[in-house]
Image (cartoon, rainbow, N blue to C red):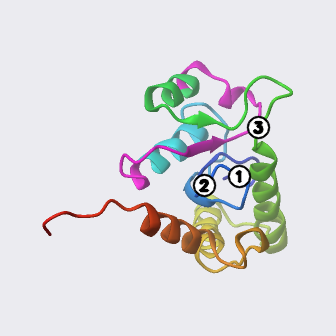
Amino acid sequence: MCARDAGSSTRRSSPTSTPARIVGWSTKAALTAQELPLEALHWAITVSKGRLSGLVHHSDHGTQYLSIDYTNALEDYKITASTGSVGDSYDNALAETINGLYKTELIYLQGPWAGLDHVELATAGWVHWWNTKRLHHALNYRTPQETQDAYNHHHAPTLVGA
């Protein structure tokens, strides 16, 4: 996420459009394919520890998200993009809502900012709050992390002979 624009990857616990846990984000002063979206994407890949099934990278139709580098990275890791061609943005409205809340609740409300390092630190705190403290009506008043934990527990493979 960035004060000017956002690039984030989320993991959904089900195929429905519910508030998702943010697993990758980035803040940058400039928007280029090499920086903002790819950094958020690579962070999400790292955090997901190779469990990329269900990972959706949310973005808009900005040129930095439609670049060859960005598109190739999504294809290489078989990650779903939340936008396709103009007019079929799948569940991107959810990402736009999260980005709007981020900007309203943090960037605009607590600015002006002394520098990008202050935005990065505040963003890390906001993402942690979003994932672990903020209760979501669509998740039966649970957090995205609680929902993900319950999903993982229910779908965890049974260890044989352990």
Mark found first going from the N terminus, 2 or 3: 2
Q: Which residue lies at the image location 60% right of the left edge and 39% below the top edge?
A: 37
Most foreground residue, 159 or 125: 159
Instruction: State the residue position of label 2.
Output: 12
Q: Amino acid at mark 1?
A: Thr
Disc nearest the viewer among 3 and 1: 1
Q: Amino acid at mark 2?
A: Arg
Q: Which residue lies at the image location 74% right of the left edge and 53% below the top edge?
A: 17
| Quadrant housing residue 62 | top right
Q: Under tag 1, what secondary structure? A: loop
| Residue 67 percent coordinates (x, y) | 63, 22
Q: Under tag 3, what secondary structure? A: loop
Check if residue 68 falls in the magenta segment.
Answer: yes
Residue numbers of the magenta segment: 46-69
Q: How many residues crowd mark 2 within 10 Å: few (<14), some (14–19), many (20+)?
A: many
- Spatial CA span between label 2 and label 3: 14 Å
Q: Which residue lies at the image location 69% right of the left edge and 52% below the top edge?
A: 2
Check if residue 50 falls in the magenta segment.
Answer: yes
Asked if the residues shown at circle 2 and circle 1 are in contact, with their CB atoms under 8 angstroms apart, the answer is yes
Marking on residue 90: 3
| Residue 148 percent coordinates (x, y) | 53, 65
Q: Residue furthest left?
A: 161
Marking on residue 16: 1
